Image (tube, rainbow, N blue to C red):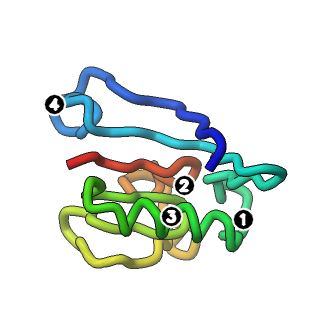
Amino acid sequence: MDSIQVSSLWRNSATSPHGSGRGIDIIRVYRGNEVAYFNNENGQTQTAFIREVYNQFVGDNRVSQALGPWEFYGYSSRPERHPNLWRQQNLKSGDYYNHRHHLHITIR
């Protein structure tokens, strides 16, 4: 990865890892001419580069959560890696819906 575009770090929250400074919201990752856009609001697909970036975060023992537009890992009620089906389930609120346009990672 050459650079990462972050949309949110710390914010005042008693229920989110952002409140303790451990949450990072990522919208883009760049490597050479490749760009990983973490957004499937309009039905975008999970590219091989997006999957590679996601796998790197999931495989890093410093990361306890990776919640993104296509996959969730470390989610409190369902910690195993699983698809984010907000679009298929037509969700309009909640954590799955809220992560449709960025990748959230939590640092241990």
User: Which comes before the other along the chain, label 4 or label 1?
Assistant: 4
| Labels 4, 3: front one | 3
Q: CA distance from mark 2 to mark 3?
A: 14 Å
Image coordinates of residue 80 in percent, x first then y, are 28, 78
The residue positioned farthest toward the left in the image shown: 14
For residue 72, side relative to residue 28 (left or right): left
Q: Residue at 48%, 62% (x, y): give it.
A: 91
| Residue tagged 2 | 100
Question: Do residues under tags 2 and 4 come within 8 Å of each other at their CB atoms?
Answer: no
Q: Residue at 70%, 70% (x, y): give it.
A: 47
Q: Amino acid at mark 1?
A: Gly
| Residue tagged 3 | 54
| Residue tagged 1 | 43
Q: CA distance from mark 1 to mark 2?
A: 10 Å
Q: Name the element at disc 4.
A: loop
User: Which comes before the other along the chain, label 2 or label 3?
Assistant: 3
Image coordinates of residue 52 in percent, x first then y, are 58, 69
Q: Amino acid at mark 2?
A: Arg
| Labels 1, 3: front one | 3
Q: Amino acid at mark 3?
A: Tyr
| Residue tagged 4 | 14
Image coordinates of residue 9 in percent, x first then y, are 39, 29
User: Which comes before the other along the chain, label 4 or label 3?
Assistant: 4
Question: Do residues under tags 1 and 2 come within 8 Å of each other at their CB atoms?
Answer: no
